[in-house]
Image (cartoon, grey):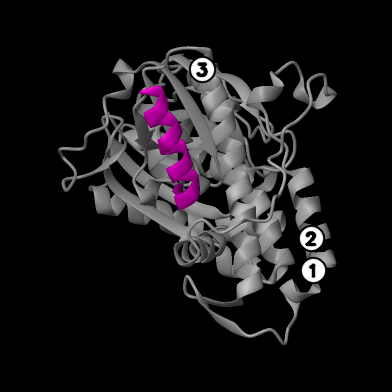
Amino acid sequence: MTVLGIETSCDETAAAVVRDAREVLSNVVYTQIPLHSPYGGVVPEIASRAHVEKIGQVARAALDAAGGQVDAVAVTYGPGLAPALIVGVNFAKGLALSLGVSLVGVNHIEAHLHSPFLFDSPADATFAAPDPRKLCHALGLVVSGGNTLLVDMPEYGRYETIGETLDDAAGEAFDKAAKLLGLGYPGGLKIDRIAAAWRKANPGAALVPFPKGRPREGVAALSGLPAELCVSFSGLKTSLLRYVQGHPEVLDAAAPVRGWGGYEVSDAVAHVVASYQEAIAVAIAERVRAALRRRRYAAFVLGGGVSLNSRIRETLAEECRAAGVPILTALPKYTGDNGAMIAGLACLRRRVDGEAAMRMDAEPSLEVGDGNGKEAANG
């Protein structure tokens, strides 16, 4: 089965064609970062307008690069920004009708958990990740700009959230810190590179003891989830603000700067950045460690744009080695939002129901495991 995947949940207009759930025949992404950078974050109205302007061009480029023939059109219908999702869903409906092919609705978060199984055609024909359909009881982690959650997967296609952030996602925590420290938007990559350079130059040096986001048992926001598997980054952001207020040298415009990871910042800023990143990485690793102790998992599946963060990958790899569990990570190009993960998951989640396809609507608050009946077809 060959599927065209459409992704417009946030600020990436993306389309890709995937064959047999894993082999990526084309992958086109139009990034909106330059449009949102002046505002320090994603503006929904700007994002949706850009999707409207670019979605046809991006989808055509993906189809042309893959030869033009597909058996289905898949689209993200949630979770995400409502105005952005609506553009993708409506475009996919029209395209599926015009091509006379199936229409498949895909959960964005679940698609991130499919991304480690994607490989490029034909360069990665020997890709080592197992067939997801043969995956037996895995632990999944999606860590991105809008989501940070742990998922228990008894088998492929079955998902249960067992832990999550109670407020900001890891990506949001990075971006807000970058804004506070004057690093601009988006901040995740800058923070990662600066922190890596500082750690290399200062092995074993003391870090600022930022909190690791441990919520207390019984907090209403847990909604029944175990506290040891959940995280809160709101206190971390507040701690960073108070630290900066109490140490004016961090944002001293007259402080000497030098290149840290390719960015000109002061030593004080680099130290704070490394400490802040470490707090987030350790917080996530501690939750994964607790989850791995709860049951024996056959694999650990890591997805989402923030999964590319080098320190997060290091700490998670250490936890998986200690637990004797193999870790499955996506190729860098498939960690962020992309159409390939949408098309790949859709290959394995299809059922025929023409009317349901046209009734499908955007669901901004869609949760993992919800709406498994949305795999609808028209044709």
Tell me which label, 1 or 3, sits earlier in the chain.
Answer: 1
Asked whether disc 2 touches disc 1, contact meaning CB atoms under 8 Å apart, the reply is yes
Circle 1 sits in a helix, a strand or a loop, which is it? loop
Q: Residues within 10 Å of mark 2 (few under 14, many from 20)?
A: some
286 up-or-down from 193: above or below? above
Name the residue located 66 percent from the left edge and 50 percent from the top edge: 172
Q: CA distance from mark 1 to mark 3?
A: 39 Å
Secondary element type, mark 2: helix
Task: Tell me the residue at 39%/37% (across/down).
Answer: 115
Q: Residue at x 67, y 36 (%)?
A: 364
Query: Is 101 positioned to the left or the right of 234 in the image?
Result: left
Q: Is residue 71 magenta?
A: no
Q: Callout 3, which amino acid?
A: Arg
SS at circle 3: helix
x 53%, y 28%: residue: 288
The picture places residue 184, in percent across and down from the top left corner, at 64, 69
The image quadrant where one finds the C terminus is: top left
Residue 138's quadrant in the figure?
top left
Residue at numbered disc 3:
293
Left or right, 245 with respect to 119, comes to right
Relative depth, front residue between 97 and 56: 56
Residue on which disc 1 sits: 247
Which residues make up the magenta segment? 308-324
The amino acid on which the numbered mark 1 sits, given as a three-letter code, is His
On residue 243, the disc is 2
Count neighbours of disc 1 (C-alpha within 10 A) and say few if under 14, some if 14 to 19, many if 20 or more.
few
Image x and y of residue 266, in percent: 62, 77
40 vs 148: above or below: below
Main secondary structure type of the part rendered in magenta: helix
